[in-house]
Image: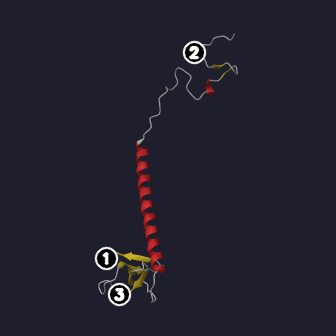
Amino acid sequence: MMPKYPDNIVFNEYSERYDASKRSYPTNVGSQKFEPIKLDKSNSANANNYFDAKFNELRDSYQKLVEEYKWNKIIYESEFSFQPKIGEVYFLYQKENKSYWLSIISPKNWNKKYIGSFKLLTNGKWEQILDDER
């Protein structure tokens, strides 16, 4: 039977050594007291707000990119019998058979099914021009 040591002595019965210096917690009466770490969780709310805002920004950017791709695909697959010039505004119309054609004629000048106005950019992309921007 092992002798009983006082509470202030840290003796490891398995290794049969005094190992107070190897402990990850205070073992002496005069040691610093245990206090739970107080976590400031307000930063997590700020981080969550940042990630939510960034996610919404990326989602909006993705939706805009998909929309631009859709319009560019429609325009490049549409019929037109002229060479579009960079920076000029052209008008997209839809035929009765649901196919599209691009024209230089404004929708004010005739009564065809008008889809939208587009401008050719220097990088070959078509940018949709809203009616109030013309």
Residue 57 in which image quadrant: bottom left
Residue at image x 46%, y 64%? 62
Q: Which of label 3 and label 1 is nearer to you?
A: 3
Question: Which scheme is used to colour this image of the protein?
Answer: secondary structure
Residue 11: x %, y % from top left: 64, 19
Q: Which structural element holds mark 3?
A: loop
Query: Can you identify the residue that label 3 sits on?
Result: 105
Left or right: where does residue 20 sit relative to residue 76? right
Query: Can you identify the residue that label 1 sits on?
Result: 131
Residue kind at label 1, given as amino acid type: Asp
Residue 3: x %, y % from top left: 66, 10
CA gap, disc 3 and disc 1: 15 Å
CA gap, disc 2 and disc 1: 86 Å
Residue kind at label 3, given as amino acid type: Ile
Residue 38: x %, y % from top left: 44, 35
Q: Are marks 3 and 1 in contact (CB under 8 Å)?
A: no
Residue at image x 41%, y 76%? 127
Q: Are marks 3 and 2 in contact (CB under 8 Å)?
A: no
Q: Which structural element holds mark 2?
A: loop
Left or right: where does residue 71 sit relative to residue 6? left
Q: Are marks 2 and 1 in contact (CB under 8 Å)?
A: no
Q: Which structural element holds mark 1?
A: helix
Residue 112 in which image quadrant: bottom left
Residue at image x 60%, y 17%? 9
Considering only vertical position in the picture, is 89 above or below 20?
A: below
Left or right: where does residue 22 sit relative to residue 82? right
Quarter of the rendering occupied by the N terminus:
top right
Query: Can you identify the residue that label 2 sits on?
Result: 7
Q: Which of label 2 and label 1 is nearer to you?
A: 1
Query: Label 2 neighbourhood size at 10 Å, few (<14), some (14-19), many (20+)?
Result: few
- Earlier-in-chain disc, 3 versus 1: 3
